[in-house]
Amino acid sequence: MQSVLGAFRDKSLFLKLLPLVSFAIPLAWLYVLEPASFEAMWKGRTFQLFFVWLVGLELIMGWGELRAKLGKLFSARAVALAVTMMLPTLYVVASYYWGLNQAILDWSTQQNITWANTMPLSTEYLVLGVLFFAVIYLGFGFKGVKAFSVPAFFLILVGAIYTIDNVFPYGQFTPFQIFVPTTATLAGAFLNLMGYTTNLSFQQSATHGTMTLLTSTNPTTQATATFEIAWPCAGIESFLIFTVVILLFLKRMPISWKSKIGYFAFGAAVTYVINSFRIVNIFLAGMAYGEKSPEVEAVHLTYGPLYAIAWIVSYPLIIIFAQTLWQRRKKRKQAATELQPASPSPA
C-alpha cells in the first residue's frame, strides 16, 4: 500500500501517464459522437479500446523503466510535447466539425474506392497511430518508442488493413486471399466432424477477384448456407495483428529464443484454429437463421472478430503468467538443491 501511495506522490507520475492522458479526451469524444462505432469489431472503433488496453499493459510492465526526457518546463521539447498531445483532439475536431471526414470521403469517392465510406475511419487509425508515436518519442525518447511499439503498431496496422480492404475489396488482394482456401478447408473439416456436409469451390470475377465458395448442409433439416469467403471473413487480419503484437511483445521478454519460437508457434496455431471456428459459426448461424439474417451479421462483424482479438490481447498475460510460474518453480528447485546436505567424504 505504501508503495502505491509513494507512486502517486512521485512528481513523474503524470509524465508516465502521458500516453493515456493524450488520447483520453479524443477517444471519449469519439464515443460521445458515435457510441455505436465502439461496438463494431470490423470497420469500427472497438480496436481503439484494445489499444488503450495495450497501453495500460505496457505501462504496467515498464513502469519502473520509463524515464521522461523533457528537461525544463518550457524547453523546446516540452513545448513540442504539449502541442503534440493536443493534436489527437484537434484531429477529432477537424474530422467532425471542420469537414475533414467529408473531404476524405469525397476524395475517396472520386478515386472510385469501393468502400469509400470507411476511408475516414481508416485514416483516423493511421493518424492516431502516428501521433501516438510522436507523443511517446517526445515524452520518453527512443526507449519510450521501443517500450510502446506494440500499441502504436497495433493502431497503424488496423488502419492499414482497413485501407487495403477499402481499396482492394473481397478477394482482390491476392497476398491475403491466398491463405483463405486453407482456412476454409479446415472450417469445412470441423463442420464435417459436427455432422454437416460441405462443398468447397472457387469463383472468379472482375469485381471480387478469386473467391473461395463454401456450402454447408444440415442433413437433418436440409438447411443450407453458402458464402463467399474473403480474407477479412477468414480472420486473416486477426492473424496479422497477432503476428505484429506478439512478435513485438516477445522481443521485450527476457527469455531464450527457443522459448520465443515456442510461444509464437503455439499462439499462431490457436489463432488459426479460432479463425476457422469463426467461419464455422457463420455457417451455423446461416443454416439456423438464414444467410442474410441479423444473427449472421452479428457473428460476421462482431462476435467472430472478437474471439480472435480477445485471445490476442489475453495471450501476453498468459505468457507473463507462465513465465512467472516457471521462474518460481525454478527458484524453489534451486533452493531445495542448496538446502540438501552435502554427501560425507569417503573415509
Image (tube, rainbow, N blue to C red):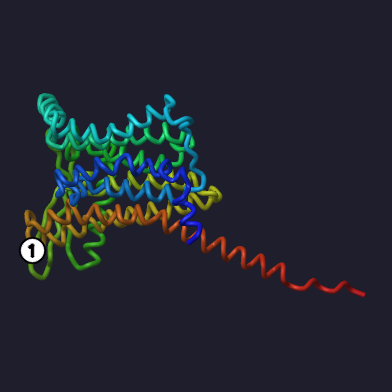
Q: Residue at x 38, y 31 (%)?
A: 81
Task: Report x, y in % for residue 196.
Answer: 17, 65
* Residue 50: % across, % down: 30, 49
The answer to which of 39 and 2 lies nearer the viewer is: 2
Q: Residue at x 16, y 62 (%)?
A: 284
The C terminus sits in image quarter: bottom right
Q: Label 1 sits on what residue type?
A: Ala
Residue 99: image quadrant is top left
> In this view of the protein, which residue sits in the foreground, 163 or 15?
15
Number of dots carrying numbers: 1
Crowding at dot 1, Cα within 10 Å, few <14 / some 14-19 / many 20+, comes out as some
Residue 126 at x, y = what percent? 27, 34
Q: Residue furthest right?
A: 347
Q: Is residue 308 visible?
A: yes
Q: Quadrant of residue 231?
A: top left
Figure quadrant of residue 281: bottom left
Whether residue 130 is visible: no
Q: Is residue 343 above or below residue 311?
A: below
Horizontally, is 227 left or right of 243 in the view? left
Name which residue lies at 33% across and 30% down: 84
Mark 1 lies on residue: 223
Q: Is residue 1 left or right of residue 24?
A: right
Q: Position of residue 305 (x, y in %)?
A: 24, 52
Q: Secondary structure at mark 1?
A: loop
Q: Residue at x 31, y 36 (%)?
A: 129
Vertical side of 24 occupied by 335: above or below: below
Of residues 336 and 241, the one drawn nearer to the viewer in this rendering: 336
Is residue 156 toward the left or the right of residue 293 in the image?
Answer: right
Q: Is residue 197 above or below residue 161?
A: below
